[in-house]
Image: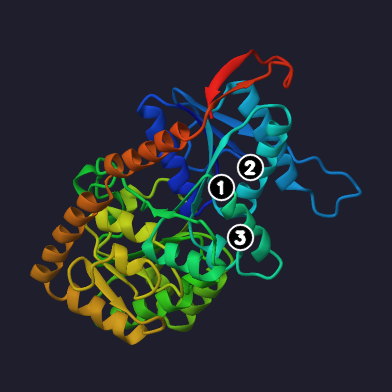
Amino acid sequence: MKIGITCYPTYGGSGAVATELGIALAARGHEVHFITYRQPFRLPAFLPRVFFHEVDVPRYPLFEFPPYDLALAVRMHEVVIGHGLDLLHLHYAIPHATSAWIAREMLRAEGADIRLITTLHGTDITIVGQDPSFQAITKFSIERSDRITAVSQYLRDETLRTFGCTGCAVKVIPNFIDPAVYARSSHPATLRDALSGSGPILMHVSNFRPVKRITDIVAIFARVRAVVPASLVMVGDGPERAAGEDAARRLGVERDVHFLGKIDVVAPLLANADLFLLPSASESFGLGALEALACGVPVIASDVGGLPEVVRSGETGVLRPVGDVDGMAAAAIELLSDGNAWRRMSDAAAIDARERFSENAVVAQYEALYTETLASAPAIAIPNAVAAGSVPFTTST
């Protein structure tokens, strides 16, 4: 199949998952075309059967805010015609599903067509989609997609509750990990060696948005540090980093808190961690938690959103109410103080992540969905006059 993928290319779970999916599909023999304004952060410089098409957003004095959604629609139209795509897979509803619908209407006006699959990741539904400025267009775009997936049962239910979509059959396909990459034994103890003598390593990886409650992470660590000599490693960057650094200074733990900034390849770091902290106010899935579990790192997190579908509280980690800094700190201290309990939870975490969220099983679900979607549509001949330099072809769309 020839598959177009549009996602946000910046640091974040939806872009990471979409990119990893594209790479996995290409490894299975499909042709994958990423269509976005920047090369996705987890996409290497070159991979066979993987192509990147940059969306150029012109800046005219008339436009105070450049119309990326329209430029994206035009680029999608060009790539579908020029490369004979079978379908477009949109990650994040706004504006990607909207732009894809516009591109399809352009194609249909020319006697062509394309299938649209939209994957909902979280804030496109729980925050952006519920804003009065976007709610109607989000609902419209979802309902115009041929197939809809959500990364958790929680997000599926939230979508149906929020939008009351008519005819929306939302299929749950979770995020995934490559077991070979997220394996504790596959990575050297580079980080642990660099922090030698500092005791256990607690870790957090995110885009440091307010929803991640960065200051709660530092507060949890300060309570742990008062009992257990340890280090906190913060991977990522974003608007709450300064608040986190201030909290570390205020609580007197700044020497033991290490802000590493944005790092694309996180598996070697996670493989050196002892606990992963994710006290978020909301998580539709929690990709960082899954990646940590796969590395055998128990997760201390909020009992919210899709996290209970990823973390088995008491077995692979511990879930506590949002804002329960004392409870999360107590759980961390208890685990770090009992080596046998930590090892049991670490082993259970790695096994569970591989059994339920392995790349092969999840990517196969997407392949089956693509096949089903294409089988439900007639073959469409796309005219060669639509795009300069293109050649006639027939695609099952």
Q: Are marks 3 and 1 in contact (CB under 8 Å)?
A: no
> What residue is shown with label 3?
139
Q: Secondary structure at mark 2?
A: helix
Q: Is residue 62 left or right of residue 390?
A: right
> What residue is shown with label 2?
100
> What residue is shown with label 1?
145
Q: Amino acid at mark 1?
A: Ser
Closest to the observer, 22 or 349: 22
Residue 185, given in percent of the width and then of the height, sits at 19, 46
Q: Is residue 151 left or right of residue 102?
A: left
| Residue 30, placed above or below residue 272 | above
- Which of discs 1 and 2 lies nearer the camera? The answer is 1
Residue 224, given in percent of the width and then of the height, sits at 29, 79
| Residue 395, placed above or below residue 166 | above
Q: Is residue 153 left or right of residue 103?
A: left
Q: Are marks 3 and 2 in contact (CB under 8 Å)?
A: no
Q: Secondary structure at mark 3?
A: helix
Upstream in the sequence, badge 3 or badge 2? 2
Q: How many marks?
A: 3
Q: Are marks 1 and 2 in contact (CB under 8 Å)?
A: yes
Residue 136 location, quadrant: bottom right
Colour logic: rainbow
Q: Amino acid at mark 2?
A: Ala
Measuring 46% from the left and 75% from the top, which residue is drawn there? 281
Measuring 41% from the left and 83% from the top, which residue is drawn there? 323
Q: Amino acid at mark 3?
A: Lys
Residue 228 in view here = no
